[in-house]
Image (spheres, rainbow, N blue to C red):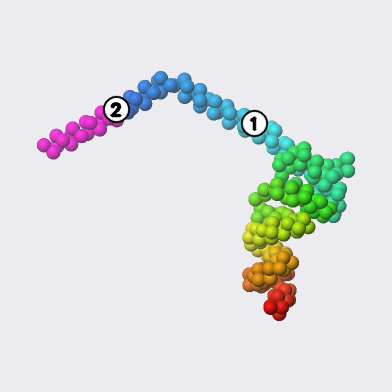
Amino acid sequence: MAKNNLKEQEKLQQEKVEERVSAIETFFNENGKIIWSCLAAIVVVGAIVLAFQHFYVQPKKAEARSQMFPAEASFRAGEYELALKGDGNVLGFEQVIADYGSKAGQAAFLYAGECELELGNYEEAVSYLKRYKGKDAIMAARALSARGDALVALERNDEALACYEKAAGKADNLFAAAYLLRAGILCEEMGDKAKALAFYKKIKDQYPQSMEGYDIDKYIARIENAQ
């Protein structure tokens, strides 16, 4: 009896499998043209995207990078106005960004922002630095710190402090000490000595080998002696 029940179950399962296979075959027979058309369309779109990347985007990126070389050289030489504006013969970061946008690379926004900061154009500096979306942690921290400096000049201290804290969090190395020191000094200027002391002690505890770490005791003593 048990064997008969087992055979019946196997027969029912086989019938279900055959029904499913038949349904799938019917679906493909009825919709085969649509399915193959969709697959063909996907292949064509993929080919177009690859061609666009290869024949347009990549050459544009290479062109943008080559156009930016003179501006980078001017920036390294401390010629910030020339680096930003160009001279009519070579492009500055401002024009490179206008012509190529992000194809010039994220560094263009960082350079432009730092140029504006050095030239005292703080709103413009913040605008460029906010557009920087680079993935390198050290460069991202540098952009945040520069943005903080511009915000301090604009007396937007709360925003500046947030930038310094984020910068220190991104650059979890000796560079972080410089951003923590900026945060501490700003907190002192804002009258929050307790928070400033916390930043200074963090430098002492976590980054004692940094340049800021060697000199941090005087900052700590200044606050503790005043209490």
Query: Magenta segment range?
Result: 1-17
Q: Quarter holding the N terminus? A: top left
Q: Quarter holding the C terminus? A: bottom right
> In the rendered view, would you say 153 is above or below 7?
below
For this rendering, which residue is in front, 159 or 82?
Answer: 159
Q: Please, what is the three-letter code of the amino acid marked with disc 1?
A: Ala
Q: Local crowd at mark 2 within 10 Å, few (<14), some, or many (≥20)?
A: few
Q: Name the N-terminal-most of marks 2 and 1.
A: 2
Q: Quadrant of residue 153?
A: bottom right
Marks 2 and 1 sit apart, C-alpha to C-alpha, by 44 Å
Q: Residue at x 78, y 48 (%)?
A: 124
Q: Residue furthest left?
A: 1
Per the image, is 14 magenta? Answer: yes
Q: Confirm whether residue 106 shows in the render.
A: yes
Residue 96: percent from left, percent from top: 78, 41
Q: Say which mark, if any, is on residue 18.
A: 2
Q: Residue at x 73, y 76 (%)?
A: 222
Query: Is residue 206 left or right of 76 when viewed as pictured?
Result: left
Secondary structure under badge 2?
helix
